[in-house]
Structure formats: C-alpha cells, structure tokens
C-alpha cells in the first residue's frame, strides 16, 4: 500500500469541492512569439530578437530587452524596442492567491534565474499593491526587488488594455473567471500579450478555447489556462506517466486527497462563491459541448467507468471528482493525438474517503449543495454560511499560516495498457503502472509554484511551446518543455512507484 486514505471528517474532501477555484482579488502587436530566438550582447544589455508572422510570412519585427546585473535604464530601453516595460505582470496581486504568486515569482526571479527580468503587480488599488510589494524583503530575506505597479480594474476595459500593452506575459489571478476572466483573455489576444491563469472552472476553460483559439493562433498569442493546482498536477502527472512508463498506456485513473494534520487552511469565501456559481451553471457546460463539432477521441480502452467504487489497490472508496482535471486532461490528450500522433489516454479523476459510510455522507452533502446552488434562496444560504456547508474547509477569515503548513496533498495514478511486446489490436491489456505526484498545500502554495514555473517556462522556452499560438491546456503547452523538472526543483515530487506486467 503506497499511502493511507483519510480516516476522519469529510472536510478534506470538501477542501476542493469548489473545483479549486482561485479567490477574487480586491501597441497592437500581432506576434508569432517572443523569447530568446536570437540574443545579441550590447554592453550590459541582452537584446532578444523576436520572430513575428505577418500576412506575407515570417519576418523580424522587434526585440525584447532583458537587463543583466547593473544593466542601466531597462524600462526606457525595453519600451523603445518593444513597447513593453515588463516580461511578467501579476494581475490580481492583492488577492489571496495573487499574494502567494507574487511572493513565489519574486523568489524565483531574484534567486533562481540568472537573467534579471522586469515585472510588475496589477490591481485596483495602488496602495494595496504597494503594501504587497513592501512585504517582499521580509519574505526574500534581501532588499526589496524592483517591482512596478499598475492600477487596473477588470471592469474598466481601457485599463485592462493599457495593462496588457505593458507586458509580454500576463499572469491572471482574478477570479471567478466565469464572471471576470473573458475581458482579460480578449484584451491579451487583441494586444499580442501571452496569458496564463489558475482557473479551475471547466466551463470557462472550454468556452475560451471554442471562442478564441482561432484568433489567438492568428495573433501568435499563447493562452494557457488551469495552471495552478487545477490542473497541473493531474495534467502533467499524466504526461509524466506517459513519458516514464515503457509501454502503451490506454487508461489512467487518478486518486487524490489533501493531507491535513490540523483543522485545515480555511479557503477564503470568495473561492466558495465561485464554486457555488459554478454549480449553478453546470448544465451550461453540457450544452456547450453539444455545440462543438469535434470528432470523438479514439480511445483504445473505454472500460474504466466514472462511478463510486472500492479501490482494492489502496484500500479506500473512490468518488468521482467534480473539478476541472478530467476536462483539462481530455483536451490535452486530444491535442497530443491530433498534433503528435500519441495514443490518447482515457482518464478518470477521483477523490477518496476511508469507507462507504463516509462516501454516502459526502455524496448526500454534494447532492444537497448542488440542489441548493440551483435555486436563489439556496444560494443565499450557501453564500452566507460557507463554514457550515463546507465543514470548515471554507471560511470568511481565509487561510492561516498554520493551516497552510499543516496541509499537503497526494495524487496517485493507476495506469493500464500494453507492454512493448504486445499488439493492442490483437492482445488484451497486460501492464499496470503506479505513479504519483505529491506536494505542499494545494490551494495556494502548489498553485503559486505551478503558475510561476509555468510562466517562467513560457518566457524562457518559447521555442518549445506549440508553434504559432492558440488556447492550450498545460499538458498541450508544456509537453515539450522542462516544466516537469522545474516543478520538481520547486517542491513537487513526480515518481514511478512500480510497474507490473503479465505474459
């Protein structure tokens, strides 16, 4: 047995009933891409030429300046070359998740990269932004880094456009995304700004792909969603399994749970609000999928069913997980099949409890919350008493440092398929592989690690991203990059437990 399932209250599972949504925080460049395609040394400044695709084909159009130590007036130099002052802007920097992302980005850029990047924080209040920045010296243990501030309100389209024009990559931490996300995605695509978020809302993610994938590709913009705990551990965990296990994998089941040694971290109520509204519009996602004309993915094995069952391998009861993981992984597998001719994996995601009694209680609670979310008076009750309905997983006070330190997560994958000496057409599956992803507190710590490392990868490994542009999942965007190594170096653990085969 590789790990023990939780044996106490239901709050560990409610911990992510919300689909792991982030909290609500208080020059028209149509480029093919940006990044170190061609570096030229000029005194203490490195000029990175960027390739752009226009109507007449591929040609040079501009450059991106990145200062080395002691590099002089970076802002003026970069603005003259590209019209962009920054490589990174964190939008929603004063929110719960945004503050963690800012601290992690500062740590990575100040301590873990050899290049000196220019970056900024953005939000509605300059005073609150400056307060966030003022905490960085204490967190970093060194003098305050040079960080810009941008006042921007997502409800003010002009301010959003101005923000997008100042950066090469926008890191959007402003949720709920179903309500506030689309204007930011639209402005980024319009202004040639690459985009990444930590959204865990399947409807928003799939809707952005359907509405903006073509336009993003035409403008050479990479839009990458769900790059927090939802759904990088699941999506990149599947990629890791496909890369590390010898054989042809046809099905993967994932099982996850948060490990709590105390009460829990108390996710802030705005994430709970996003979850309730997500349940309210759940039926819209089914209608959205029916409107697509995509061909069915040719899975080789569809025997794995998404239902409640006892998992004998780990001795626990598995319950279908309602988050974004399954949606994201399915889109990744479609992309890898269509663009890289990889065998698509049929993926199912579960959360776990210790017994059938706990499973029944959880299912009843989930049914009750879903029912209440569909009626107006029910939503009022849910939003007024988050602590009660979520078994203390969500609260008005938000996370505590102690709760964060006492929380971590485990995600285990059971993969089935064929060993290399078997023919999937004529033989039956004979291989089972067990892999895992583990990491620190998921909602804020793992989310900030995942988002920052994904963002740095987008800047430093642009050539390895999908050519052109478009709206991508993390697995589709980063399958050819070193993101897995970066995540491992930052505290996440990807490992192969064992592989068994039958003759």
Image (tube, rainbow, N blue to C red):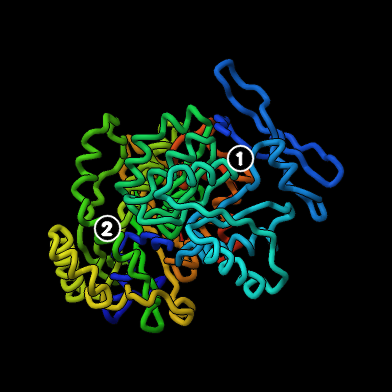
How crowded pointer 2 is (Cα within 10 Å; few <14, some 14-19, many 20+) is rated as some
Split into 4 quadrants, where in the image is the N terminus? bottom left
Choose between 289 and 129: the one closer to the eye. 129
Q: Position of residue 34 (x, y in %)?
A: 62, 37
Q: Position of residue 282 (x, y in %)?
A: 21, 51
The vertical placement of 440 against 284, above or below, is below
For the question of whether residue 87 can be seen, the reply is: yes
Choose between 450 and 27: the one closer to the eye. 27
Contact? badges 2 and 1 (CB < 8 Å): no
Residue at (26%, 44%) from the top-left corner? 302
Q: Position of residue 230 (x, y in %)?
A: 40, 57
Picture disc at residue 76: none
Choose between 244 and 266: the one closer to the eye. 266
In the rendered structure, which disc, 2 or 1, sits on the residue that comes first in sequence?
2
105 sits to left or right of 335: right
219 sits to left or right of 424: right
Which residue is identified by label 1? 462
Residue at (27%, 29%) from the top-left corner? 293
Which residue is identified by label 2? 322
How crowded pointer 1 is (Cα within 10 Å; few <14, some 14-19, many 20+) is rated as some
265 sits to left or right of 73: left
The vertical placement of 361 against 97, above or below, is below
Q: How far apart are marks 2 and 1 (CA)?
A: 33 Å
Q: Does dot 1 land on a helix, a strand or a loop? A: helix
User: Which residue, as the protein is rendered here, is positioned at the far right?
Assistant: 43
Q: Does dot 2 land on a helix, a strand or a loop? A: loop
* Number of numbered callouts drawn: 2
Q: Position of residue 3 (x, y in %)?
A: 40, 73
Choose between 110 and 232: the one closer to the eye. 110
Residue at (42%, 66%) from the top-left corner? 443
The vertical placement of 397 against 254, above or below, is below
Locate residue 376: give its quadrant.
Answer: bottom left
């Amino acid at each position: 047995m590789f790990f023990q399932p939780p044996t106490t209250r239901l709050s560990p599972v409610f911990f992510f009933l919300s689909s792991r949504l982030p909290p609500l925080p208080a020059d028209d460049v149509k480029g093919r891409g940006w990044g170190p395609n061609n570096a030229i040394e000029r005194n203490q400044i490195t000029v990175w030429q960027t390739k752009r695709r226009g109507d007449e084909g591929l040609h040079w159009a501009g450059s991106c300046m990145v200062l080395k130590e002691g590099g002089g007036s970076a802002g003026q130099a970069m603005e003259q070359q590209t019209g962009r002052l920054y490589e990174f802007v964190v939008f929603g920097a004063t929110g719960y998740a945004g503050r963690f992302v800012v601290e992690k980005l500062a740590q990575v850029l100040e301590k873990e990269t050899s290049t000196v990047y220019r970056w900024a924080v953005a939000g509605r209040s300059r005073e609150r932004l400056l307060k966030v920045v003022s905490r960085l010296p204490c967190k970093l243990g060194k003098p305050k880094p040079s960080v810009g501030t941008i006042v921007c309100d997502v409800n003010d389209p002009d301010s959003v456009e101005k923000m997008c024009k100042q950066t090469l990559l926008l890191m959007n931490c402003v949720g709920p995304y179903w309500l506030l996300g689309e204007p930011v995605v639209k402005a980024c695509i319009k202004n040639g700004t690459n985009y990444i978020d930590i959204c865990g809302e399947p409807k928003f993610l799939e809707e952005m792909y359907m509405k903006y994938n073509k336009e993003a590709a035409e403008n050479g913009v990479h839009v990458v969603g769900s790059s927090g705990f939802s759904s990088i551990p699941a999506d990149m965990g599947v990629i890791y399994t496909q890369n590390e296990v010898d054989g042809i994998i046809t099905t993967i089941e994932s099982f996850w749970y948060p490990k709590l040694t105390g009460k829990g971290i108390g996710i802030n109520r705005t994430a709970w609000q996003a979850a309730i509204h997500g349940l309210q519009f759940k039926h819209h996602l089914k209608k959205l999928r029916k409107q697509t004309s995509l061909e069915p993915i040719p899975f080789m094995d569809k025997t794995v069913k998404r239902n409640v069952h006892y998992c004998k391998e780990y001795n626990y009861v598995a319950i279908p997980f309602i988050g974004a993981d399954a949606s994201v992984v399915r889109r990744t597998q479609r992309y890898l099949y269509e663009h890289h001719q990889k065998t698509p994996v049929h993926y199912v995601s579960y959360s776990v409890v210790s017994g059938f009694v706990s499973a029944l209680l959880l299912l009843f609670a989930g049914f009750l919350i879903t029912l209440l979310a569909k009626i107006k008076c029910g939503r009022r009750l849910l939003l007024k008493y988050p602590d009660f309905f979520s078994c203390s997983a969500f609260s008005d006070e938000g996370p505590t440092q102690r709760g964060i330190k006492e929380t971590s997560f485990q995600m285990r994958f059971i993969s089935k398929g064929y060993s290399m000496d078997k023919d999937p057409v004529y033989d039956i599956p004979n291989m089972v592989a067990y892999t895992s992803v583990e990491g620190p507190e998921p909602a804020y710590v793992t989310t900030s690690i995942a988002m920052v490392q994904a963002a740095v990868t987008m800047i430093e490994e642009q050539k390895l991203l999908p050519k052109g542009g478009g709206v991508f999942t993390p697995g589709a965007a980063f399958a050819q990059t070193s993101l897995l190594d970066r995540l491992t170096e930052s505290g996440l653990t990807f490992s192969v437990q064992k592989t068994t085969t039958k003759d």
